[in-house]
Amino acid sequence: MKKLIALVFIALPLEACATLVGGGGNQTINMMTADNRPAQARILNGTNNFQTMLPSSVGVKRNNSAVTVNVIEDENTQPTVYSAQPRLNPWFWGNIIIGGLVGSTTDIASGAAWRYDDSVIVPVTRVQSENKQQNGL
């Protein structure tokens, strides 16, 4: 009986592994363009929708849907859409291994069961001006 109680006290802190150890329900993603030049972008993450200038560190809420980056068209940039797909957070499996139904449910509800890449490189097509085209640049 003492061993069972000790096991419960050891396993209890491991519940919700991804929530506690894996960074919780939020994540910061470093976003940049493939050519490392600035571009205006609109970020869509669930119900969050905001505009930023790339490169940028963007805080997003983790969930099982993609983070969509819409590069906004201007005189230098063609519109581009890029999606960063989520994947299961490795810490989530800690709950499955120890049989933590409550903990894994907490991870899913908080979004901590999901993870995006830490860095995202958005392919951007640049518009060439008439002067550059005429000069062969």
Image (cartoon, grey):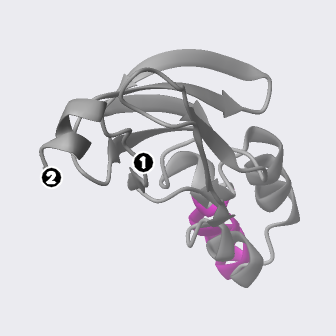
Q: For residue 125: magenta?
A: no
Q: Is residue 1 visible?
A: no
Residue 53's disc number: none
Dot 2: element: loop
User: Of residues 11 and 22, which is closer to you in this image?
Assistant: 22
What residue sits 66% from the left and 80% below the top? 3
How far from the left and from the top, in percent, is residue 126?
36, 42
Q: Can residue 115 be seen in this view?
A: yes
Q: Which amino acid, mark 1?
A: Val
Q: In which quarter of the image is the N terminus?
A: bottom right
Q: Give the range drawn in magenta.
A: 1-15
How far from the left and from the top, in percent, is residue 32?
32, 43
Mark 2 — residue?
Answer: 136
Mark 1 — residue?
Answer: 124
User: Of residues 80 and 59, which is closer to you in this image?
Assistant: 80
Q: For residue 9: magenta?
A: yes
Determine the image quadrant of residue 69: top right
What residue sits 64% from the left and 44% below the top? 67
Dot 1: element: loop
Q: Residue furthest front?
A: 134
Left or right: 46 in relation to 87: right
* Label 2 vs 1, first from the N-terminus: 1
What residue sits 76% from the left and 56% below the top? 103
